[in-house]
Image (spheres, rainbow, N blue to C red):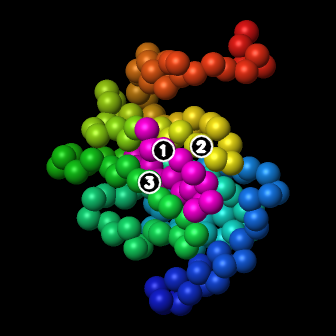
Amino acid sequence: MTQDHAEEVRRMAYDQSPSMNSGFLIGHINANSLKQKIDSISCLMKRNGFDVFAVSESLLKSIDEDSTIELPGYNMIRFDRTDDGKKRVGGGLVCYLHKDVQYDRQTVTKKPGKNNTQYIAIHLISPVDLDLVVVYKPPGSSNIPQLEDLLKSLLSGRSLPDQYCS
């Protein structure tokens, strides 16, 4: 399948995507190379009508063009693997948000944290009010305190519904 044909298939699929009235659906997949699986992920998103879909281990680098992974009808936020000259295994995050979803991009880590932890934190505004955090934590890393600090900072000033409080 040529790239032009694949793009046309993706565009046609998203022209008939389910409406936002059927609920709010969030999905995630560990892709281990988004570029190699973009057509399958596109079909999965279309078939299930995801409003937000996160991809970990995208394996994207800054030289990879947005056009190779964009999906019609979706905004995209990405965090690429570091290009520091070291051989890396894993990493990279992409979050697709349906164009009807209003959001405020709160945080995308500029550099990976200790042990190469990466995260994207997004405040969804409409049709749901929700803080979404997508994290890539490499195997063998032990940085739970850093993740706890991140969650605390995101939740500061926000009140949680009773069902989330213990």
Q: Is residue 112 visible?
A: yes
Q: Quadrant of residue 137?
A: top left
Q: 66 or 112, which lies in front?
A: 66
Q: Amino acid at mark 1?
A: Asp
Q: Can you identify the residue that label 2 sits on?
A: 125
x and y percentages locating residue 139 in the rendered image:
45, 34
**Going from the N terminus, do you reach mark 3 or mark 1 first?**
3
Query: Mark 1 falls on what kind of element?
Result: strand
Q: Residue at x 60, y 65 (%)?
A: 41
* Apparent side of residue 46 relative to residue 76 in the rendered image (left or right): right
Do the numbered discs 1 and 2 sit on residues whose CB atoms are within 8 Å?
A: yes
Q: Is residue 41 above or below residue 131?
A: below
The residue type indicated by label 2 comes to Ile
| Mark closer to the chain start, 3 or 2 | 3
Residue with the mark numbered 1: 104
- Identify the image quadrant of residue 128: top right
Magenta-colored stretch includes residue 92: yes
Query: Among all residues in the image, which is located at the extreme left?
Result: 85
Q: Residue at x 79, y 51 (%)?
A: 23
Kindly report the distance in space between the C-alpha atoms of the residues bearing marks 3 and 1: 11 Å
Q: Is residue 29 left or right of residue 115?
A: right
Which residue is rendered at x = 67% and y = 20% of the image?
160
Which residue range is magenta in the image?
Answer: 91-106
Q: Which residue is mark 3?
A: 77
At horizontal 58% and vertical 43% (from top left) the residue drawn is 124
Query: Dot 2: what SS?
Result: strand
Q: Residues within 10 Å of mark 3 (few under 14, many from 20)?
A: some
Q: Position of residue 70 (x, y in %)?
A: 47, 69
